[in-house]
Image (tube, grey):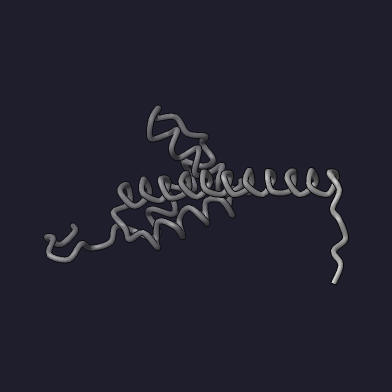
Amino acid sequence: MSRVPHGPSDETARIFALQEEVHQLKEAIVSHAVVDQAIGVVVALGRMAPDQGWQVLKEVSQHTNIRLRNVAELILVWGRTGEMPQEIGAQLEDLLDRYGPTQIPGAPPLE
């Protein structure tokens, strides 16, 4: 069984492809972390379960036609600076009202 020798250009192309894949994976990790942090903000703000926080974040993205990661970034900026685009803030407020606070087991009833 003979092997076809691979030239330097084949190896170089493979290295570039692997570098691109690593770059994409790093981007995905950062994006996932940003979204997770924004879900945490929504969960704390809305006193809701994480799956509801994810749903709120997703719906804000859909209703504003802004990519989910960008919505998440804007929520994190708002957490640090208190500034948020009006459209995002209005959607977030509406959805938090709709999903309402989740009753925490053992906590006194919400009024």
| Residue at 33% across, 58% down | 100
**Image quadrant where one finds the C terminus:** bottom left
Q: Quadrant of residue 53?
A: bottom left
Q: Identify which residue, 80 or 94, lies in the foreground.
A: 80
Does residue 1 sit above or below 31 in this rendering?
A: below
Along the viewing direction, whichever of 105 and 10 lies nearer the viewer? 10
Task: Identify the residue at the far front of this view.
Answer: 1
Residue 19 x, y percent position in the rendering? 68, 43
Q: Could you tell whether 1 is left or right of 29 in the image?
A: right
Residue in view at x 79 percent, y 43 percent = 12
Identify the residue shown where x is 80% and y is 46%. 13
Q: Residue at the bottom extreme?
A: 1
Give the mark count.
Answer: 0
In the figure, is residue 59 to the left or right of 95?
A: right
Q: On the rendered image, what quadrant is the N terminus found in?
A: bottom right
Q: Residue at x 45, y 33 (%)?
A: 77
